[in-house]
Amino acid sequence: MADRKVVVVDPYSAGRGIAPAFAERGVGAIAVLTTPEPPAGLAKSWFPENFAEVHVVEGPLEPLADKLSIHEPLCVVPGTETGVETAEALSELIAPGRSNVLERSHARRDKYEMYLALRAAGVPHLRQISSDSADEVAEWLTATGLDSIVLKPQESGGTDDVFVSSASGDWRSLFHRILGSVNKLDIVNDRVLVQELAIGTEYEVDTYSIDGAHGLAAVWRYAKERRGDRLGIYLSNTFVSPTDPVVPVLFEYVRQVLDATGVRNGPAHVEVMITADGPRLIEIGARCAGAEQQELSFLGAGESQITRMVRHWVDGDRSVGLYEQRQFVKTVYLSSPAAGVLRNAARLDRLDTLMPSFNRDVIPYREGSRVPRTEDLWTSLGYVVLATTDADQLARDEELVRRIEAELVVEPV
């Protein structure tokens, strides 16, 4: 086993944790990059020292697959969203049948293709259109009679350029703001996804599948708010108990989504809105939940999608099932209503002494920092992770975070 390898395509974001997890079991890793350099928003999570070899995709995949095959890799997996399609194509060339249904790979990457896959399979879905023409969208709005809509890039993440509008509002300016721009994944938005606005409670459902059998690794409940035409300002993300009545409802729907989009092996990250009409897919990614979600899942459940991946490929553990809850965990996001200079931020330095459930924080801004107006996950002021076996303590500490946030002063410049 010491000579065996795993191949990780674009090992950024949560994917940064895959190579170290396999290394602990004596399995080395090879990195494949789909671009010479990682996207700017993901560059800080690139650690080339974790890999025995680093390859950059240049032209057809077959020559690269031949080089990688020498190592007889246990698996080829994506580290983040940008690596999904390449990882699946390489996997099929190197070890057929160890990944997902290749013909539907784009339906696990492109938000409009997801919708088409669900529609073809008869799975309940939101109405939407993909277009590079505002006039075509206008005709669609008239035909559907929709009033409230969401506009977003088809291939991006982190609520990047996600807007909400009414059909009678100035949605055309938002459409043209997205069309042709370069998103956070360094992809040109050559089309815009326009979708009916889903009203309800949004959940993150993280799964792990083996040969078409699906298991739940974690469920999280998002709290977001709308500010003007911006949709998706994160407030918090809460670990949901596996005994919560919503979990089987979500899982039954998500299994249909996984089957419709061709997920058979490995992790998937599925965002679902529970609406008055039932669950509706927001999007699916055939990769691990990003950012710090793997570490947070380990806090809450004692495992993660990455630990399941290691058990699957190293130990041959083919079991899939329901996660457990060991702690209450919540990420509380901080935001700024305006751009400017952050003042009286000293209390942010004392969060660990003020809150018994404090686990860690990621707050890049301090006294005198220039901060952006919070419009999406990328422009958050940072976040605080709370973890405890005491639910009441968690609630008290979240309230304290909000009081401190409300006291922060941002001076316009």
Image: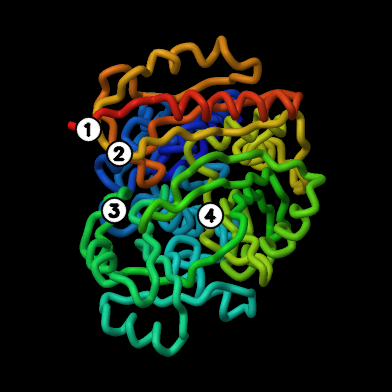
Residue 38 image label: none
Q: Earlier in the sequence, mark 3 or mark 1?
A: 3
Structural distance between the alpha carbons of marks 3 and 1: 27 Å
Residue with the mark numbered 3: 183
Q: On the picture, is 39 further left or further right than 311?
A: left
* Labels 2 & 1 near each other (Cβ < 8 A): yes
Structural distance between the alpha carbons of marks 2 and 1: 8 Å
Residue with the mark numbered 1: 412
Element at badge 3?
Answer: loop
Q: Residue furthest left?
A: 413
Q: Quadrant of residue 53?
A: top left
Q: Where the C terminus falls, by quadrant? A: top left
Structural distance between the alpha carbons of marks 3 and 2: 22 Å
Q: Where the N terminus falls, by quadrant? A: top right
Mark count: 4
Residue with the mark numbered 2: 338
Element at badge 1?
Answer: loop
Q: Is residue 194 above or below residue 51?
A: below
Residue at left offset 58%, top offset 47%: 222
Query: Mark 1 is on which residue type?
Result: Pro
